[in-house]
Image (spheres, rainbow, N blue to C red):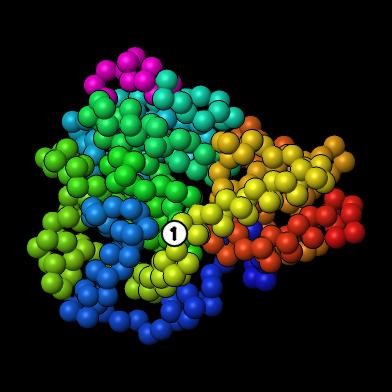
Amino acid sequence: MIDGYRLMIPGPVELHPEVLAEMSRPVVPHYGEDWTAYYNETLDSLRTVFGTDGDIYPIPGSGSAALEAAIGSCVGRDGRLLVLSNGFFGERLASIALSIDPHTAVRRIPLSEPFSTDELTDALERESGITAVAVVHSESSSGLLNPVAELAEVCRRRGILFVVDAISSLGGVEVPMDAWGIDICVCASQKCLEGPPGLGLVAVGREAWPRIEGTKARGWYLNLQVWREYAEVWADWHPFPVTLAVPAFRGLRRGIERVLEEGLTRRIERHRRSAHSLRERLSEIGFPPVFPESIASPTVVAAHGRADVSADEVVDRLRGEHRILVARGMGEFKGAAFRIGNMGLQAMPETTDSLMQAIRCVAGGEG
């Protein structure tokens, strides 16, 4: 039995009834005048969330599909990518990039440290021919936040494309793409945007296209030049090259509307306050946070276990006794920490209060 659990994992998130209702509507054609207008309106709303006036492509598939589209399209056969890795999903970026180009450079640092501008500068000086840099913003495998605004500035000064995996941050953490100089920003539908799984989102800034055009990208489905061509040539009736996932897109549309109805500034502050409160309350009962507030992600709260109640015991007992799902630690934090999703509806006071009551019961308190 997989139903009936409350999802407090770092994605997918539980969906608001309005989103579920939107997904249950009859399937309609993914082309034609009416759908194209609906599609373009949705992209305009997404531009507000991404903070860009560039292009956005909702690719049916996971966030990893969107990452492969971004990396393959900006590197192709001619460029060379530098991947910054300090976590499981940094390694996922590296795996995708190395499958496209075995000459990809990977700079690895400990999972407990965010990347600094000095680290990036040193990597760029040591590696030759780098044309693009990719990094994870919120490393949801550990709850670490990388300073992408500062890293973007280093790349901008050197004329290097900057690609950001914002899959677990966009919509819950500040990441204004154009203002920070992010050239390509990748997200997915099932986390802070409060949509269902199934859509990988790639936003391409206007200044990125001159450096992407002419790149000999591999493949067709995940080639952003193909998506751009259809957006232009079939703009009036079918502005994408494949069958769009209509129910997932409709669900995402309602999720984005909920984000904008709340207001991005207010929403980001809500996620910050919620994460801060969770870390404080967990510390009070002996579960210290993995990272200090200054480098911790507002969308994933990771905490260590106690000597008498291990991290894995917290996960198992929340599931078995309270039907709440939180996540185990990954990598070097496996068995040592547990992770709580703090995205969308998860970051509401009534939700976190209920979770903390259950954790106190697990910890031996009165609840």
Considering only vertical position in the picture, is 162 above or below 6? above
Residue 83 showing in the rendered view = yes
Q: Nearer the viewer, residue 178 or 366?
A: 178
The residue that appears at 44% across and 70% down in the rendered structure is 261
Considering only vertical position in the picture, is 18 above or below 303? below
Considering only vertical position in the picture, is 220 above or below 135? below
The residue that appears at 27% across and 70% down in the rendered structure is 41
User: Where residue 177 sits in the image (x, y, percent)?
Assistant: 33, 47
Quarter of the image where one finds residue 5: bottom right
Quarter of the image where one finds residue 122: top left
**Residue 126 inside the magenta-drawn segment:** yes
Badge 1: residue crowd in 10 Å (few <14, some 14–19, many ≥20): some
In the rendered image, which quarter contains the N terminus? bottom right
User: Where residue 259 sits in the image (x, y, percent)?
Assistant: 45, 65
Residue lying farthest left? 233
Q: Tell me how many marks there are.
A: 1
User: Where residue 60 sits in the image (x, y, percent)?
Assistant: 34, 61
The residue that appears at 67% across and 37% down in the rendered structure is 290
Q: Secondary structure at mark 1?
A: helix
| Highlighted range, magenta | 119-132
Q: Nearer the viewer, residue 273 or 286?
A: 273
Callout 1 amino acid: Leu
Quarter of the image where one finds residue 233: bottom left
Q: Nearer the viewer, residue 265 or 48?
A: 265
Residue 196 showing in the rendered view = no
User: Where residue 268 sits in the image (x, y, percent)?
Assistant: 50, 54
The residue where tag 1 is placed is 264
The answer to whether residue 244 is left or right of residue 342 is left
